């Protein structure tokens, strides 16, 4: 099982431009597979990233401003839409963003935090 998982992981890293955009996970592919956290990419996802319509930024601290998002390094990103791709334990990271009574709506009955 581990050998097959490692093979799939290496194939995806080879086939998709994950390194180019800093999207190679810090954990093994097997963790995503075992927790049913597999991603399905929209059509033309990487071409949109290539031409700058999708931007990727990692930041452990951030806040919203009237035009988008400010990152911990002080840089400001203008944005119409912000996707919070928090990784494996999204609920833990998103739990305190929303005030009550809205906080309990971000988690469904299975414990999953849907991004859409």
Image: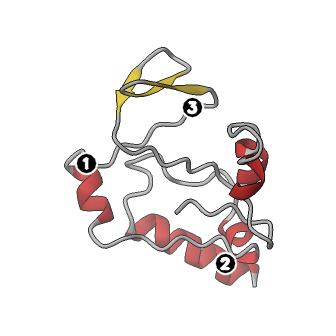
Task: Find residue 53 and name its label.
Answer: 1
- Let me know if residue 115 appears in the view: yes
Q: Position of residue 113 (x, y in %)?
A: 68, 60
Q: In the structure shown, which secondary structural element does the residue marked by tag 1 occupy? A: loop
> Which residue in the protein does label 2 denote?
5
Q: In the structure shown, which secondary structural element does the residue marked by tag 2 occupy? A: helix
Tag 1 or tag 2, which sits nearer the N-term? Answer: 2
Q: Position of residue 67 (x, y in %)?
A: 36, 26
> Which residue in the protein does label 3 denote?
59
Residue located at (75% from left, 78% from top): 2
Q: In the structure shown, which secondary structural element does the residue marked by tag 3 occupy? A: loop
Cα–Cα span, label 3 and label 2: 29 Å
Cα–Cα span, label 3 and label 1: 19 Å
Q: Position of residue 111 (x, y in %)?
A: 80, 66
Q: Is residue 57 above or below residue 34?
A: above
Residue 16 figure quarter: bottom left
Q: Is residue 41 above or below residue 107?
A: below
Tag 1 or tag 3, which sits nearer the N-term? Answer: 1
């Amino acid at each position: 099982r581990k050998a097959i998982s490692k093979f799939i992981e290496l194939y995806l890293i080879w086939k998709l431009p994950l390194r180019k955009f800093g999207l190679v996970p810090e954990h093994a592919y097997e963790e995503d597979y075992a927790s049913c956290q597999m991603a399905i990419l929209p059509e033309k996802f990487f071409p949109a990233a290539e031409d700058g319509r999708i931007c990727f930024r990692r930041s452990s601290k951030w806040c919203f401003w009237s035009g988008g998002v400010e990152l911990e390094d002080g840089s400001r990103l203008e944005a119409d839409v912000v996707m919070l791709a928090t990784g494996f334990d999204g609920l833990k990271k998103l739990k305190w963003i929303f005030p009550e009574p809205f906080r309990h709506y971000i988690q469904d009955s299975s414990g999953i935090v849907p991004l859409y």
